[in-house]
Image (cartoon, grey):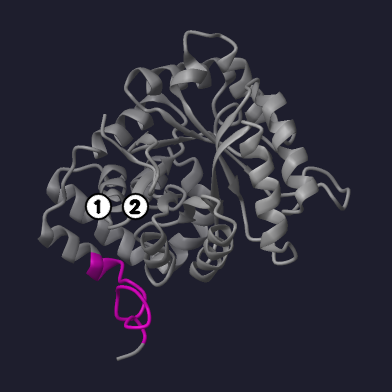
């Protein structure tokens, strides 16, 4: 396993982050436990979840599942760098969502109970709250870190200027502030290259790429649809994107075949090759998908392949960061 620092911190995390969105939902609890045990045995020490995950059963279900897994002992909790999230509504009540100090602290306490742990390594703001002043957000996060309940604070789905604004506010308080940003990033969706990644690199913020295969679109979607084995590919963001990118996806799968490589591994290897990216957040449903993601760690795409991928899935504008991406 390869490890790297989480942004500007000294915390060491695996170059692959195990996302838990499918655990307990598309994978049974015993299979989820086996998958997490295998990931940990193979050196994956970075796990990501959110307070609302498992909403298909009930909000908080996935954290509860993780809590039951941690309760088995064997050093599971001590070995894992655990991230969860706060923002999305957990009920219909007006103060049970967002980034008010009240909700941040209450949400942390609830996550700790569900996760069966005393601390959260990375407490991530799942979305920017335009109604919450940064002074209020950082006051709550400082309280939780001083209490030892949170080690680091991250963001997710922030714009570049939100990262800059939040970090400047934290620095005025002499608080560590944001150490990671989790954004959707893959060959199809490259908007973060404009400002999010440049802002993150400027402030020493780790970039975690969620949906690195665009919901399965880049994992051999057309072949799976033809074989009748598609699961995620046949629904959600992948199905919608396939209508727009069918020709490019077909060429992508043909390129992967010519290289003798699995499309999912190529897609993950591309994300991991991007400057500023700390880890993709993978969401395996079974051990085969986990094995595929770990093989991608060893895959180095030649420059000519990277150039061909840029032709198939062009960057936004002129490529690279703004303003050069859209101006002279």
Image coordinates for residue 91, horizontal then vertical, percent:
83, 44
Residue 281: percent from the left, percent from the top?
43, 42
Quarter of the rendering containing residue 315: bottom left
Residue that sits furthest to the right in the current view: 93
Q: SS for tag 1?
A: helix
Q: Quadrant of residue 25?
A: top right
Boundaries of the magenta span: 310-326
Q: Residue at x 55, y 51 (%)?
A: 175
Q: Which residue is mark 1?
A: 273
Q: Which mark is residue 290?
A: none
Mark 1 crowd level (few <14, some 14–19, many ≥20, 10 Å Cα)? some
Classify the position of the C terminus by image quarter: bottom left
**Secondary structure found at label 2:** strand
Residue 70: x %, y % from top left:
56, 16
Queried whether the magenta region covers residue 319, the answer comes back as: yes
Q: Is residue 260 shown above or below 157?
A: above
Q: Position of residue 8 (x, y in %)?
A: 38, 49
Q: Residue at x 41, y 60 (%)?
A: 203
Look at 19% across and 43% down and name the residue there. Answer: 261
Residue annotated with mark 2: 277
In the rendered view, tell whether residue 119 sits above or below residue 49: above
The residue that appears at 11% across and 61% down in the rendered structure is: 304
Q: Are marks 1 and 2 in contact (CB under 8 Å)?
A: yes
Q: Is residue 294 above or below residue 309?
A: above
Main secondary structure found in the magenta portion: loop
The answer to whether 22 appears left or right of 283 in the picture is right
> Is 199 situated above or below 255?
below
């Amino acid at each position: 396993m390869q490890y790297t620092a989480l942004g500007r911190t000294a915390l060491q995390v695996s170059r692959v982050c195990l996302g838990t969105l499918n655990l307990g939902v598309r994978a049974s609890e015993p299979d989820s436990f086996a998958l997490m045990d295998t990931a940990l045995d193979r050196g994956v020490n970075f796990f990501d979840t959110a307070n609302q995950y498992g909403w298909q059963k009930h909000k908080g279900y996935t954290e509860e599942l993780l809590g039951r897994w941690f309760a088995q002992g064997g050093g599971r909790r001590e070995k894992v760098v655990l991230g969860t999230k706060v923002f999305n509504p957990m009920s219909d009540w007006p103060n049970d969502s967002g980034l008010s100090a009240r909700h941040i602290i209450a949400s942390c306490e609830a996550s700790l109970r569900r996760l069966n742990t005393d601390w959260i390594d990375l407490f991530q703001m799942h979305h920017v709250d335009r109604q919450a002043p940064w002074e209020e957000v950082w006051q709550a996060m400082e309280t939780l870190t001083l209490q030892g309940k949170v080690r680091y604070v991250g963001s997710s789905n922030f714009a570049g200027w939100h990262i800059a604004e939040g970090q400047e506010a934290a620095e005025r308080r002499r608080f560590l502030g944001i150490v990671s940003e989790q954004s959707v990033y893959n060959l199809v969706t490259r908007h973060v290259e404009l400002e999010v990644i440049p802002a993150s690199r400027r402030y020493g913020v780790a970039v975690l790429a969620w949906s690195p295969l665009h919901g399965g679109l880049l994992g051999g979607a057309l072949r799976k649809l033809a074989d009748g084995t598609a699961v995620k590919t046949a629904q959600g963001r992948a199905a919608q994107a396939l209508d727009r990118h069918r020709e490019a996806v077909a060429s992508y799968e043909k390129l992967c075949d010519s290289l003798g490589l699995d499309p999912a591994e190529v897609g993950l290897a591309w994300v991991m090759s991007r400057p500023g990216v700390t880890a993709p957040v993978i969401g395996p449903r079974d051990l085969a998908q986990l094995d595929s993601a770990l093989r991608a760690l060893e895959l180095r795409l030649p420059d000519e392949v990277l150039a061909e991928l840029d032709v198939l899935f062009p960057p936004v504008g002129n490529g690279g960061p703004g303003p050069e991406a859209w101006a002279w």
